[in-house]
């Protein structure tokens, strides 16, 4: 199924939590003054258009934790088939993009925006819709060279507000 088809299928399926997820997310958004309609519009736009230069990365940042960022976006794992929600491993590895080519969406939960897992230039390529060079193991029969990911899986991120503030500070012009 396409991303929009998966969303429609999930929306028409019966709720498995008795409405608790929706209630929890709505309460969290209200408490944190998150403009729900604007956020949902941005998410649907990202799902329809996919990762490209004109679609921003959706980033939910909270100051203390417990704001409902992750619980909201973790629903992507229920909407899309297993193996199609890509996440970069939480520990440093040689092949952090293994499996991205099958992804429908990319979800980076509790992301740091530093170079501890993936270099910042490579992150920027992923975030701005550019092709991303992906190292892959060379000991697999039929595999040679590395891959250039050109997929359209939109990127969704949760992080702490301090990480966004640090990025903003780094982006300032230094006279």
Image (tube, helix red, strand yellow):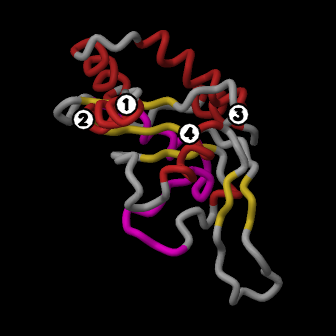
User: Separation of disc 1 and disc 4 at Cα?
Assistant: 29 Å
Q: Residue under circle 3?
A: 52
Residue at 40% in and 46% down: 113
* Residue 156 belongs to the span the image colors magenta: no
Region in magenta: 68-94
Question: Where is mark 4, residue-wise?
Answer: 155
Q: Nearer the viewer, residue 162 or 107?
A: 162
Look at mark 2 in the image and give the residue it sits on.
Answer: 162
Residue 51: x percent and y percent?
Answer: 67, 36
Q: Position of residue 155 (x, y in %)?
A: 56, 39
Which residue is tagged 1? Answer: 174
Q: Secondary structure at mark 2?
A: helix
**Disc nearer the start of the sequence (1/3):** 3
* Residue found 50% across the figure and 29% down from its top: 58
Q: Earlier in the sequence, mark 2 or mark 3?
A: 3
Is residue 169 positioned above or below 33 on the image? below
Query: Disc 4 to disc 3, how far (Cα)?
Result: 10 Å
Please name which of the two marks, 1 or 4, marks the residue nearer to the observer.
1
Q: Image point 39% across, 10% down: which residue? A: 35
Between residues 160 and 7, which one lies in front from this camera angle?
A: 160
Marks 2 and 3, Cα distance to the nearest angstrom? 26 Å
Q: Tags 4 and 3 in contact by the CB under 8 Å rule?
A: no
Return the disc, 1 or 2, that comes first in the chain's sequence: 2
């Amino acid at each position: 199924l396409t991303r929009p088809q998966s969303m429609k299928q999930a929306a028409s399926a019966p709720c498995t939590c008795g409405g608790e997820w929706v209630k929890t997310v709505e309460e969290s958004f209200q408490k944190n003054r998150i403009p729900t309609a604007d956020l949902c519009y941005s998410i649907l736009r990202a799902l329809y258009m996919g990762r490209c230069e004109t679609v921003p990365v959706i980033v939910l940042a909270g100051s203390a934790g417990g704001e409902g960022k992750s619980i909201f976006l973790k629903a992507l794992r229920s909407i899309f088939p297993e193996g199609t929600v890509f996440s970069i491993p939480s520990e440093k590895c040689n092949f952090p993009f293994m499996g991205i080519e099958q992804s429908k969406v990319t979800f980076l939960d509790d992301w740091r925006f530093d170079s501890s897992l993936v270099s910042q230039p490579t992150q920027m390529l992923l975030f701005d819709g550019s092709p991303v060079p992906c190292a892959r193991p060379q000991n697999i029969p039929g595999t040679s060279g590395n891959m250039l990911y050109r997929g359209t899986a939109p990127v969704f991120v949760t992080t702490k507000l301090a990480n966004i503030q640090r990025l903003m500070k780094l982006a300032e012009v230094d006279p």
